[in-house]
Image (cartoon, rainbow, N blue to C red):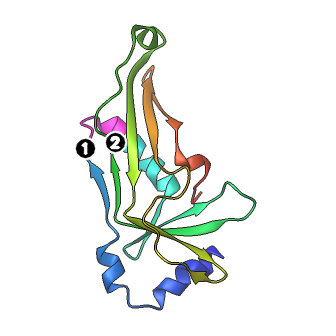
Amino acid sequence: MVANALASLTNRNKKQETSEAEVELVPASQDPPLDEFMSRHIDKIFLRKNGLIFTIRTEKSERTPIQLRNLEISFPMDEVISEKDMLQGISRRVPHTVSPEATREFKNDTWGEWIKSPPPQMAGFILERKNRTRTALKSPAKFYSFE
């Protein structure tokens, strides 16, 4: 089904969709190891192909391809780290917001209409640095993946 979904788009004129398929990271975190971890984490969730962005919903028994338009991933500011967190080795916690302009699903061998809201469980994720290790505390990778 995933191959059919991607193939169905290669046979179309993608000029308009290609210009709408940017992934924008706002702003850069000024933490190169965190940026690298975030980039790898994003690549687990989203596939960029031919200027388009896709993911696959995996939370149910069936895998549903989803296309995203104008995806923006942003983080307004770090969370405040409490004294208790610091004692546990946590030095940074960064919430990220995932905001596609619109999404559509591939069902019954065809792409559906664009919907102006993100799919369920894709609101964002939280990256944490604890004892020099970076992890994703909350992530859409539990429900969406290309791995």
Image spot of residue 85 (x, y percent)? 45, 14
Quarter of the picture holding the N terminus: bottom right
- Work out whether 46 lies above or below 16: above
Which stretch did the figure color magenta? 28-34
Residue at image position (54%, 84%) is 7
Distance, label 2 to label 1, CA atoms, is 7 Å
**Within 10 Å of the Cα at label 1, are there few (<14), some (14-19), or many (20+) other Cα atoms?**
few
Image spot of residue 84 (x, y percent)? 45, 9
Residue at image position (58%, 56%) is 145
Residue at image position (52%, 43%) is 139
In the picture, residue 95 is in which quadrant?
top left
User: Do callouts 2 and 1 mark residues in contact (Cβ within 8 Å)?
Assistant: yes
**Within 10 Å of the Cα at label 2, are there few (<14), some (14-19), or many (20+) other Cα atoms?**
some
The local secondary structure at tag 1 comes to: loop
Q: Earlier in the sequence, mark 2 or mark 1?
A: 1
Find disc 2 in the rendering and name its residue. Answer: 35
| 122 lies left or right of 69 | right
Q: Mark 1 is on which residue type? A: Ala
Find disc 1 in the rendering and name its residue. Answer: 28
Image spot of residue 125 (x, y percent)? 46, 41
Task: Examine the structure image and report whether residue 33 is included in the region drawn in magenta.
Answer: yes
